Amino acid sequence: MKKILLMLFILLFILIIMFLSINNFTKNQDQDNEVTRIINQLNPLINEEKSYLKIGKPDEVFQNNDAIYSQSVYDKNGEKTILTYSTPKVLKEGRYLEIKHKRNYVITYSEIAKENIPSEALKEIESESP
């Protein structure tokens, strides 16, 4: 029984060290790296965040109308991050989105009214818009 508990404790310790190492590794990785997106998606030590943006032009549009965007997003404190995300259709420019993400892994996005965006984020979004 003691051997089993010791093995479980060692396994748990190794898992914790592994997650902390991966967490540290992916913190400063390239936003377009698919491996870091997958790690960020699965890592339980990374918190889900909400960020806000004003929809711009897509970087790429495919024949089936799917689109890829790479844009600056701002959290509630006005801190900037660049996210790349895809959509099943081209979004209407000038509208506002709330994006839920774990670092560079986008979980979901939804259109949001300008009034519902935190003031610090809105100030940064508006200062970036032409």
Image (tube, rainbow, N blue to C red):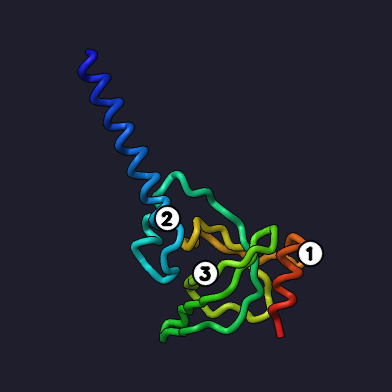
Please identify the quadrant where the C terminus is shown: bottom right
1 or 2: tag closer to the N-terminus: 2
Which labelled disc corresponds to residue 83? 3
On residue 40, the disc is 2
- The reply to whether dot 1 and dot 2 touch (C-beta < 8 Å) is no
At 41% from the left and 57% from the top, the residue drawn is 26
**What whole-number distance in Å separates the C-alpha atoms at marks 3 and 2?**
13 Å
Which residue type carries mark 3? Leu
Q: Position of residue 126 (x, y in %)?
A: 74, 75
57, above or below 111, in the image? below
Vertical comparison of 43 with 96: above or below: above
**Circle nearer the N terminus (1, 3):** 3
10 Å crowding of disc 2: few (<14), some (14-19), many (20+): many
> Measuring 49% from the left and 70% from the top, which residue is drawn there?
85
Q: Distance between the Cα atoms at labels 1 and 2?
A: 30 Å
Q: Position of residue 91 (x, y in %)?
A: 58, 77
* Towards the viewer: 64 or 46: 46
Q: Earlier in the sequence, mark 3 or mark 2?
A: 2
Q: Depth check: 114 or 77 in front?
A: 77
- Label tally: 3
Extreme-top residue of the structure: 1
In the image, what residue type sits under mark 1? Glu
Q: Is residue 26 above or below residue 46?
A: below
Q: Which mark is residue 25?
A: none
The picture quadrant where one finds residue 115 is bottom right
Q: Is residue 118 left or right of residue 1?
A: right
- Picture coordinates of residue 39 (x, y %)? 37, 55
Q: Residues within 10 Å of mark 1 (few under 14, many from 20)?
A: few
For the residue labelled by badge 1, is the local secondary structure a helix, a strand or a loop? helix
Closer to the observer: label 1 or label 3? 3
Q: Amino acid at mark 2?
A: Asn
The quadrant of the picture occupied by the N terminus is: top left
